[in-house]
Image (spheres, rainbow, N blue to C red):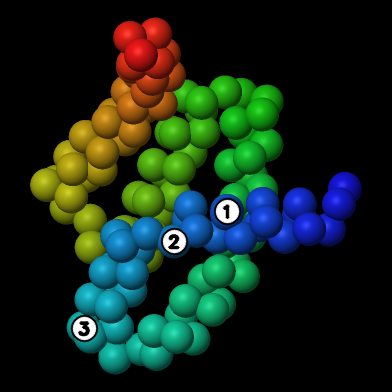
Amino acid sequence: MDILTLIVASVAFALYVTCPRMTAMIATESKMSGFNPILTVSLGCMLGIPLFIVLFYTFKHLGVEATIMLAAAFDVGAALLLGKINLKGGLELLIITAFVYVGIRVAPIIAEAILSAL
C-alpha cells in the first residue's frame, strides 16, 4: 500500500471519529470528577484502538446489525463505568442506536433517489 494513501485514509478516519458528543462527555466528566481531560483522551484513544478493530471485524464477519449492537454495548459499558446509567439514559441510548441503524439502511436508498432525480 502507498504510504500517502495510508496517511490520507488515517487522517480521514481520525476526522470521522472525532465528534462533539465525545468531547462534551469528556469535558463534563473532567469538571465533575477533576481528572485531566488531555491524559484521559490520550489514554482513551490508545485503549480504543483494539475496540475499533473488534468493531471492524464484527462488521466484516457478522454484519451491520451485530456491529451496531456491539457498539451500543460499548456505550452501556462506558456509562456503567462512569456511573451514569439510568432508565432515561438507557432509553435514549436505545433510540440513538435505532436511528443509527435506520440511517445506515436508509441513507443509500435516499442518496440513490436523489442522484436519480438529478
Position in image of residue 68 (x %, y %): 44, 34
> Image point 61% across, 70% down: which residue?
46
> Image point 32% across, 23% down: which residue?
102
Residue at the right extreme, as displayed: 1
Q: Nearer the viewer, mark 1 or mark 3?
A: 1
- Amino acid tagged 3: Met
- Amino acid tagged 2: Thr
Rendered view: 107 above or below 91: above
As drawn, the label of residue 13 is 1
As drawn, the label of residue 32 is 3
Contact between marks 2 and 1 (CB within 8 A): the answer is no
For disc 2, the marked residue is: 18
Of residues 104 and 67, the one drawn nearer to the viewer in this rendering: 104
What kind of element bears circle 2? Answer: loop
For the residues labelled 1 and 3, the Cα–Cα distance comes to 30 Å
Rendered view: 49 above or below 111: below
